[in-house]
Amino acid sequence: MASSSLLISLASCLLFLALSPALASNSEGEALCAFKSRLSDPNNVLQSWDQSLVNPCTWFHVTCDSQNRVIRLDLGNSNITGTLGPELGRLQHLQYLELYRNSFMGKIPEELGNLKNLVSMDLYENQLEGEIPKSLSKLKSLRFMRLNNNKLTGSIPRELVTLSNLKVLDFSNNDLCGTIPVDGPFSTFPPESFENNKRLNGPELLGLASYDFGC
Amino acid sequence: MENMHLQPKTIILAFLISLSFLKTTAIKTEAHALLRWRSIDIDGEGCTSSWSLVNSTGPCDWSGVRCNHAGSVISITLYDCNIYGMLRGLDFSALPNIEHLNFGSNNLYGFIPSTISVLAKLVTLDLSWNYFTGPLPLNIGNLTELNYLDFRGNQLNGTIPTQLGSCIKLSELYLEYNQFIGPIPPSLSQLKDLTKFNASVNQFSGSFPIFLLQNGTRLTYLDLSDNQFSGPIPLDVGNSTELEILELSSNSFTGQIPSSLGFLNKLYNLSLNNNFLSGEIPKQLGNMSALEFLNLNYNQLEGTFPTAISMLSSLSFIHASNNNLSGVIDPYLGQNGHLKLINLSNNSFFGELPTHICKGSALEVLQLENNQFSGPLHTCLRNCSSLFFLDLSNNYLRGSLRFFTIKPNLKVLRLSENNMFGNIPAEFGNLTALLHLALGSNHLTSKIPEELTRLRSLQVLELSNNFLSNSIPLHLCRMKYLEVLDISMNQLSGRIPSCLWSMDALKVLNLDSNKLSQRMHSIVGHMTSIQSLHLSNNKLTGDIPLFLKSGSNLTVLDLRNNILYGLVPSWIGTSLPLLRVLCLSSNRLSGKIPPELSELSFLQLIDLSHNNFTGPIPKSFGSFKSMSRRQEGNVDGWPDINFIHNYYEKYIIWDFVYEVIDWKGIEFSFTKTLLLMNGIDLSCNSLSDEIPAELMTLKGLVFLNLSGNNFIGNIPENIGNLNLLESLDLSRNTISGSIPISMTNLTFLAFLNLSYNELSGTIPIGSQLQILTAQSFIGNEGLCGTPLSKLCPGDAMSTESSSKNAHTSDKNGEERIWLFAFVCLGFISGFWLVLGVLFFNKSWNYTYFVLVDNMLQHMMKLFAI
């Protein structure tokens, strides 16, 4: 059943793609279809995504701007299982990526660093693994970055200190290591943003210690 | 001597007697085995009801049973004979001579018993189209005489046992329509006599089982479609030159189509559709001299459609739709005179249409829609006398329809979304077989010709988005099979012919965006069958007419943007019981909203915005039955159209059934997602009073827009119940009080506008609210907290700094001691030495490092002072 519905959805996604050759949202619809194909969706939250519609703007949980460009993806708390793929990096106009409280597994794709307009990246309370990609430091518009309650490992990339718009950050309840940056926006984040990372060793000592100390 | 002779004779005789006795017992055993099976396992006897030992000596004359000369059962054929039951109790060991066992098309269930493996002489085993479950027995490999094995159409699962490879005489193996998983076991490469193998419609995975096609394979038929095979199609596939049918559709095959397929000169059916194949179509496919049927639909193929394939002499069916193919179609396509079907739709082909496409007049179906073909269409369609399905919509074809030569058999003609101009020629009235005519989104002018009304079989007439003018011809009403009439977005003026309302078959009537002007309440008539009615964006005036009351089949009623005034009649709630979409927005309707509307138990969408309604929202709105739960997307109840041709499926209703919705602040035209939609838009009226708490029981609501009214009171406390809400607009009212905490439950909320009210207090922090911009909250004097810049009283410092402060002061005393210790240490030993040691101490925890950091800061300050 699951597989046949997957095939059906793939087929209809392909149909959708074919029906919208000249539209701006074509590649975004394609990306969303590719994303959907990775997911198991027992609550049928993505039911509206399998249609031969001209663009993804009337799909649920997708928000477009007036130029039919996808600016939001709201799939928090949806009981979705699956992985994040590089195709998400093709949602060039995305501002809000709300995928919190699901069962996303695997790594955070480094292609998310291509989401130049991203304001909020909420991936908290999933089962994401691997390191926080350095590429996320390219997200210059980012204000919210919540990756807490996952299984992320490795050190906090120093490059993130350049995200000057970052207002809220939460890396707590992971398995990060090394030390916590103190520069840039990191000077404002409370210790709670980093707690429960057993191998995370506290703020770096003003450049005196290697940041991946203890990793 | 005689005695001497007698003796051996007696012995032989005795031997024979005893043999025949043994044989009769054997026969009796066989009969008893079958009867016992029937009594234990079979609930419905079907054709075995005649099996009995009362009037017969043995099973050989029983229906479906055949014996050898010795009277032993060699074949049981109970095909399609209505038996219900299991095989579990059949004692196969009592039937040692069975060669053919056929239980196909019955109602047998349960496992396939492993005891079946004792049938050492079994040549044919057919258990197809039953309800067998569980895995295949592992010892199936003992059936080494097996030639024909058919398990198709059951619910078998698990993997295919490696042991199946021991059935080395197998020539036909059918496993389709089961739930088998895993890879095809490589041991099947031992099946050198295998000629036909079908594993389709299962959940097989892994890479292409190329071993089936290696080392002198005799396979003529291989069907792996509808599985989860992945990876490339190997080049070696070209070695299996006996192949006649190769079906690999609906898998996840990637990579290129192997050019070696060109060696398969007996192959007549190649189906690679619905995969992820990429790259170009190899021109070597043009060597497949036997090819009749080619299906490449739904892949990611690019490049051109190779000329060599166009030239194939036997090719009759070409499917290559939904790829990224481009280029000019070879003018020789169709030269072979056999082409029956061409579907190249949904690609990026350009240039003129191929000119020989109808040579030999065989062509029946031509689908080139959604490409970039240009030029005129008349030359290519000469000789297309068998053509009955023609879809050229959404291209850049240009010209006058005058040049369209009439194809008497044409049932479907779609030329919409091109650059056709001029008028609709009167000759179109000669296309008398037409069921579907779509000329929408062109530049057609002048009036709708009266002659069109001669198309007496027509079911769909779509002329929308042109420049058609004048009035709607009266005679349209003569098309008594017409189900869809879409003449929206033209410049039609005058009155709506009243006979339209009572057309027997009409389900969809779309007159949107014309210049129709009429006093609505003057309309009389009886609306019989109409399910979707759009009269929106015209100049209709007057009250909502009473004749609509007869619309007992109405599902979609859209009167948006006219000049309707007066009250909304309460009978809308009672006389239109099937209504799912009600749009009366942008008129001059006034008075109170009738509470009876809530009796519309299927209503999913109500848009009364931009009118002059006054008074409160009826409390009864909380009882909209359909909005109280999530829509499951059921198509039942929505207008559908039964087309006779299956090529047609994708056009069903959604080209014609739609509604424009103000969705998250922007207007979008919803089609298929309407199925899943629940929403209320009452914005821009003069509604007053409090927002009824009853609305919060409408748990299926996806959007709610109450903006631009005079609502007072609080936002209902339990607004968090509406957890499917994606868009909520309460702006520009006089709503007061605080924002309910429960709003943080709305995890799908993508658009929130509470601006310009009298809300106060702290904006709750939660999953979705926190990331919204100030735009959602501005114009509320009393509101504070993020994302507004105004801080809340008593919250002068942000949470993070206050907690950091608490942390620091706790440790202050202890810290100072450490500070001095470190100052000394620092000056004496140098930081590096100390830290070097500390770095090896893995037990250092976070708090400790905070300490160190703070101490260093203190130290800096100290030095600064």
Image (cartoon, rainbow, N blue to C red):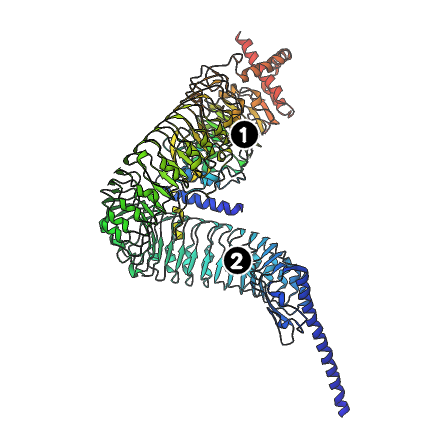
| Label 2 neighbour load within 10 Å: few <14, some 14-19, many 20+ | some
List x then y, in percent, for residue B483. 36, 46
Q: Between tags 2 and 1, which lies in front?
A: 1
Up-down relation of residue B570 to residue B176 (above or below): above
Q: How far, Cα to Cα, is label 2 from label 1?
A: 46 Å
Work out which residue is located at the far bottom of the displayed protein and give it.
B1
Residue B265 in view, yes or no: yes
Q: What residue type is labelled 2?
A: Phe
The amino acid type of the residue labelled 1 equals Tyr
* Residue B855 visible in rendering: no
- Residue B822, given in percent of the width and then of the height, sits at 61, 14
Nearest the viewer among B601 and B805 is B601
**Label of residue A173 in the image:** none
Q: How crowded is mark 1: few (under 14 residues within 10 Å), some or many (20 or more)?
A: many
Image quarter (top left, top right, bottom left or bottom right) of the N terminus of chain B: bottom right
Q: What element carries label 2?
A: helix
Residue A124 badge: 1
**Taking A211 as reference, is B36 above or below it?**
below
Q: Do labels 2 and 1 share a chain?
A: no
Q: Mark 1 lies on which chain?
A: A
**Residue bearing the label numbered 2:** B211
> Is residue A79 left or right of B510 when viewed as pictured?
right
